[in-house]
Image: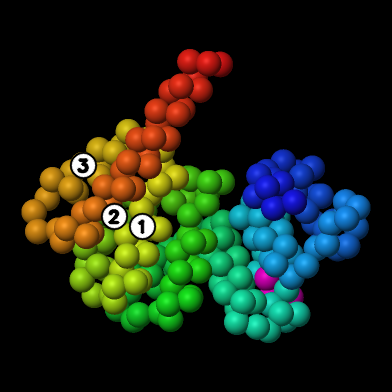
Amino acid sequence: ARAFTSAARSDEDLATLRGWLDDTGIPAGLTVDTELRWSVLAALVANGAAGAAEIEAELAGDRTASGEREAAYAQALLPTAENKAALWALLTGPDALPNWRHRALLQGFAHPTQVELIAPYRERYFETVAQVWATRDSEPAQEFAQLAYPAYLVEDDTVAATDAWLAGDGHPAPLRRLVAEGRDGVLRALKARAKDAQSA
């Protein structure tokens, strides 16, 4: 169920997920508990099939610390340029967020169905990551370096932008390592795509 939820993209699959939230069409033996409900709602939100009203309604029924985290994550997934810009302002602004909220917003900022929305933030990441690193505590600084890296922009341009940043002077060694790890992930994805293309 979790794999299906994370892979759902088509209108038909998203309609199936919507049914699970409405307690219809649930496969025999599957319990749609609170955790799965949030995962289903997040998938719908990421694909533009649910919005802020549904998030608020779900949170109203789960006023727990976990529910607050899941709602923040779902809100970060809302697929609008305005939402992503507001998130970026929060994540890079002068005021530190609570660690749980910082992590949830970072996790929801980028999604594989939202590549076009997050494309402008490749350049902004490299312009900002050193400043964020220098002004945040260790844990949120590391999370920003890792989770805000443009990993879903699997393109040569991402590798080139990373190489240009790594060629700069003065970056702390731990930050350089995290950014280089992001680059390695993009390179692996590029090689996998090339291999798939040869097999097709």
Q: Residues within 10 Å of mark 3 (few under 14, many from 20)?
A: some
- The residue wearing badge 2 is 178
Describe residue 58's horizontal placement relative to residue 117 as left or right.
Answer: right
Q: Looking at the picture, does residue 96 appear above or below residue 108?
A: below
Amino acid residing under circle 3: Asp
Q: Compare residues 179 and 60 and report the one nearer the observer.
A: 179
User: For the residue labelled by badge 2, is the local secondary structure a helix, a strand or a loop?
Assistant: helix
Q: Looking at the picture, does residue 133 appear above or below residue 63?
A: above
Kindly indicate whether the residue at mark 2 contacts the one at mark 1 (C-beta within 8 angstroms).
yes
Describe residue 143's horizontal placement relative to residue 20 as left or right.
Answer: left
Amino acid residing under circle 1: Gln
Real-space Cα separation, disc 3 to disc 2, in angstroms: 13 Å
- x, y percent for residue 100: 48, 76
Real-space Cα separation, disc 1 to disc 2, in angstroms: 6 Å
Magenta stretch prevailing secondary structure: helix
- The residue wearing badge 1 is 146
User: The C terminus appears in which quarter of the rendering?
Assistant: top right
| Mark closer to the chain start, 1 or 2 | 1
Residue 145 visible to an observer of this rendering:
yes
User: For the residue labelled by badge 3, is the local secondary structure a helix, a strand or a loop?
Assistant: helix
**Closer to viewer: mark 3 or mark 2:** 2
Residue at (41%, 42%) from the top-left corner? 153
Segment tinted magenta in the rendering: 53-57
- The residue wearing badge 3 is 163
Amino acid residing under circle 2: Leu
| Mark closer to the chain start, 3 or 1 | 1
Residue at (36%, 53%) from the top-left corner? 149
Q: Residue furthest left?
A: 169
Residue at (29%, 73%) from the top-left corner? 138
Question: Would you say residue 54 sits in the magenta stretch?
Answer: yes
Describe residue 115's horizontal placement relative to residue 3 as left or right.
Answer: left
Q: Looking at the picture, does residue 65 appear above or below residue 55?
A: below
